[in-house]
């Protein structure tokens, strides 16, 4: 429970750091003015309202959820992957719409020495495919330390964002925008951007997990770094099938509070990445205080599930303190459910993870990256909350 005094102190400290005061929108007051003080009211009233506010103003609305023609094709099974430690499945997840067809290439490594179904992690990969998520394992990267994930008894799954939607402003002609956006009407100001499209892709991977008996789809985490971390959060908010949502150094329009305007701000992100969010988001360029939401409300949408935010000491562009404060301010919704959120309002020292409550957090020493240290923290957190034995 965060005491009022703590919030005031924290507020003061954070204002002092950014030299800016800010007033967050009320998490537990509905648009009607009604105070939300039960789980039932949160679930039926305020939670749907908050999701709609994020849809309309930030990430945009998807024209489609699960396509009726979604198809899974296991293209390859190798039960002797990683010198016999894992079974590799390469799965094509395909779909079609008025503008054509698309396919997500999902790679899944299942630990051979763990009884199925096994829990695991889905990485939304936003870095070059060949260097980071090579399924042949000739090239290995700490961005996806697959061998370590499997050694710890977890499923390691990944897909690349470019399978779903290109990471460039192509006037929304390609990827799932080209496939599913209505051909005959102009694009609305609340139409989905690329972050929402990639999140949609992660949900289609979950559709596959539900269909694979070797995977415990009730214990799957969605993980992303930076723009992938923003995507993981929006995916976890809109798809409650993910039991754990992990956002690594997601910064602006990810875990960091927009109103702190510390590091990257809304104008900077919209200028550099005009395709990530809906058109309406541009109304808030330089006007963070006018947003009807802030990013702590995005984290609150995960309650009472598990959510994990990680920052790095040198990653000022992503505003580590703003990411931490979002976790603190999301806590009242976890309180409503009677579960522990973060459990503190004091930012921990570097490399001292907070793993006690449903909200996990760590501040890694170093720069903007997704590293073995981060992954091992995520797995420690999953071990603790999913009660699985560490196998290293
Ligand atoms: C930066 C961008 C951030 C973050 C990052 C990344 O250039 O400003 O919002 O998403 O890219 O994805 O690595």
Image: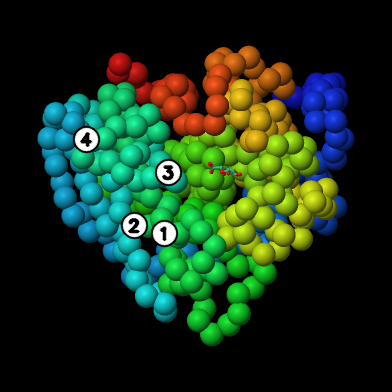
| Horizontal and vertical percent position of residue 148 | 31, 25
Residue marked by disc 1: 164
Mark drawn on residue 138: 4
Quarter occupied by the N terminus: top right
Q: Position of residue 270 (x, y in %)?
A: 67, 55
Q: Which of 13 and 167 is in front in this view?
A: 167
Q: In this view, does 387 lie to the left or right of 111?
A: right
In the orientation shown, which residue stands out farthest toward the bottom?
184
The residue shown at (33%, 62%) is 103
Q: What element carries label 2?
A: strand
First in sequence, mark 2 or 1: give its number. 2
Q: Which of marks 4 and 1 is in front?
A: 4
Q: Categorize mark 4 by other alpha carbons within 10 Å: few (<14), some (14-19), many (20+).
A: few
Residue highlighted by disc 3? 127
| For discs 4 and 2, the disc positioned in front in the rendered view | 4
**Lateral position of residue 140 relative to residue 382, left or right:** left
> Residue at horizontal 76%, vertical 60%?
283
């Amino acid at each position: 429970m965060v005491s009022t005094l703590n919030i005031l102190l924290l507020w003061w400290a954070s204002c002092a750091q950014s030299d800016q005061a800010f007033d967050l929108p009320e998490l537990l007051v509905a648009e009607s003015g009604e105070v939300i003080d039960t789980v039932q009211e949160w679930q039926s009233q305020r939670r749907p309202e908050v999701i709609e506010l994020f849809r309309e103003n930030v990430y945009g609305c998807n024209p489609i959820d699960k396509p009726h023609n979604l198809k899974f094709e296991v293209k390859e099974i190798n039960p002797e992957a990683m010198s016999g430690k894992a079974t590799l499945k390469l799965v094509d997840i395909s779909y079609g719409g008025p503008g054509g067809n698309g396919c997500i290439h999902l790679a899944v490594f299942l630990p051979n020495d763990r009884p199925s179904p096994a829990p695991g992690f889905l990485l939304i990969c936003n870095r070059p495919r060949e260097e980071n998520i090579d399924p042949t394992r000739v090239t290995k990267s700490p961005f996806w330390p697959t061998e370590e994930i499997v050694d710890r008894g977890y499923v390691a799954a990944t897909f690349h964002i470019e399978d779903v939607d290109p990471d460039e402003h192509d006037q929304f002609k390609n990827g799932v925008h080209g496939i599913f956006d209505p051909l005959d009407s102009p694009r609305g100001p609340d139409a989905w951007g690329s972050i929402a499209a990639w999140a949609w892709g992660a949900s289609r991977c979950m559709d596959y997990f539900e269909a694979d008996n070797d995977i415990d789809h009730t214990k799957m985490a969605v993980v992303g770094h930076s723009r992938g971390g923003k995507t993981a959060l929006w995916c976890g908010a809109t798809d409650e099938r993910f039991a754990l949502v992990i956002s690594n150094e997601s910064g602006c329009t990810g875990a960091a509070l927009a109103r702190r305007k510390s590091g990257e701000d809304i104008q900077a992100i919209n200028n550099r990445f005009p395709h990530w969010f809906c058109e309406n988001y541009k109304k808030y360029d330089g006007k963070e205080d006018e947003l009807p939401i802030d990013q702590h409300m995005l984290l609150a949408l995960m309650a009472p599930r598990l959510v994990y935010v990680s920052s790095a000491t040198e990653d000022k562009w992503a505003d580590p303190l703003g990411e931490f404060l979002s976790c603190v301010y999301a806590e009242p919704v976890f309180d409503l459910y009677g579960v522990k959120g973060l459990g503190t309002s004091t930012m921990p020292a570097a490399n001292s993870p907070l793993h006690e409550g449903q909200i996990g957090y760590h501040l890694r020493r170093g720069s903007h990256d997704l590293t073995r240290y981060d992954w091992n923290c995520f797995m420690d957190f999953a071990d603790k909350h999913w009660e699985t034995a560490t196998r290293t």
